[in-house]
Amino acid sequence: MLPTRRLVILFALGLVPLAFAGTWPGLVYAAGVYDMALLVAFLAEGVLLARAANVRARRGHEPRLSLGEKNWVSIELESFVPVPLIVVVRDEFPESFLGEKPLRRVRLASYSRAEVRYAVSPTGRGDFRFGDIHLRISGLPGLAAIDCRVPASESVKVYPDLIEVKKYRILNRSHHLRLMGLNVIRGVSQGHEFEELRSYMPGDDYRTINWKATAKRMSPVTEHFRPERSQNVVLCIDAGRMMATRVGSLSKLEYAVNAALMLGLTALENGDNVGLAVYSHDLDLFVAPSRGRTALYRILENLYAVRARYTSVNFRQVMKRLLARVRRRSLVVLFTDLIDEEGGETLLASVRVLRPKHLPLVISMTDVGIERMARTAPEGTGDVYRRAVATRMLVERSRKIAELGSRGILMIEGSPEEITVKAVNKYLDLKATRRL
């Protein structure tokens, strides 16, 4: 049982008359009676709360939390007592999650329910644990409060960004993928199998306008053709030491995993087979290409546990094993980091073995810190050396990218926040131009 702030203030007010006790001695007696009445009221309310305060608390959230996104957590309170209560709620979420400490004040009427919500942003994939729920309960007089701990410890799984996946599916069904920055390329070059009639959208080829349907609807209608399906897309994620570098609250590996998931979902929605490979010093994980909802779940479950290894990447070994596993022509998408000079040279020499059987696509994340260092005006001798090193690294990176392009290897470069949209748009472009 705890005294509340209101009780302390009321006791303090009871001391004010004592300042005039020299003039009116009876004020001392009045103050004593006042404080004694407060004490009795405090004890009575505390005993009542201890006997009657029966409040149930339950935590609710999505079965799978999404990495790097706002995930809403709710706490439902239910009162089983005939008097109104004031409840202050505090939840214990995993320490590595970002978010304000959930401290909420709720007024519960007799025999009623209430809900409080707060948002958390996980900064890593894997298993995490919520703690118990803490309640501070007081009555309407607000003189006493009791603390109670509701056992609610539970483990939760954090997956790659499922919120973006849900958003993609909603926008895809409503044909509004441009809201995500995706360039939905339409036209006869997409395929030869008729799929459906759609309202005209900016970017549609005028040659696909169905004039008969347009005349009936009194608005432009286009024919949409289905691209070739059942092609192979293999998502290859670098889990070496360079990918452990953090950019803001997430590592480069987390950005690569999120981008790979979105690209895989896009390919599956287009009827292609999607496989997964995770590599570092060797080919650590391989999931054979398949399609449908089962393929998405298999990719999710395997990406959920991927961790960066503090080793360099052996591209020669990885490419050799990929060639042995992937026999059918495929779009091989390599998510990696070219900032490491030795790794970049090895990648350049090794990825050529994928040609001409496969179509390699290298997706590399720019290092924002190095770019900023190269642009910042030096203020001292140390800054001059750091800027020179950063500039040299960027020049070397540009040379490697140019060499990859000159040898028929597709290349995408962008900030960690950009690679998802760039990767998906490149896939859609390759699909539309029938290069797979």
Image (spheres, rainbow, N blue to C red):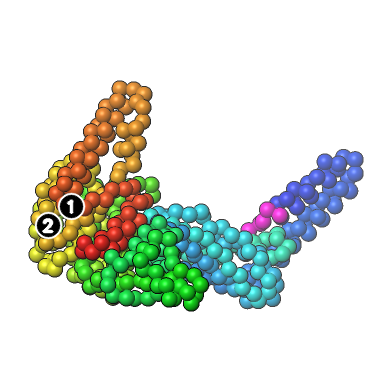
The residue that appears at 30% across and 67% down in the rendered structure is 188
**SS for dot 1:** loop
Where residue 189 appears, as percent x and y from the top left, is 28, 65
**SS for dot 2:** loop
Compared to 172, does 33 lie above or below? above
Q: Is residue 272 visible?
A: yes
Q: Is 159 contained in the magenta span? A: no
The residue that appears at 49% across and 63% down in the rendered structure is 72
Where residue 142 appears, as percent x and y from the top left, is 70, 61
Q: Quadrant of the C terminus?
A: bottom left
Considering every residue shown, the one lying at the far top of the view is 381
Give left or right: position of 425 versus 234.
right
What residue is pinned by disc 2?
355
| Magenta region, residue range | 2-6
The residue that appears at 88% across and 45% down in the rendered structure is 25
Where residue 387 appears, as percent x and y from the top left, is 29, 30
The quadrant in which residue 428 appears is: bottom left
Tell whether label 1 touches label 2 (CB within 8 Å).
yes
Q: Quadrant of the N terminus?
A: bottom right
Q: Earlier in the sequence, mark 2 or mark 1?
A: 2
Viewer-nearest residue: 76 or 68: 68
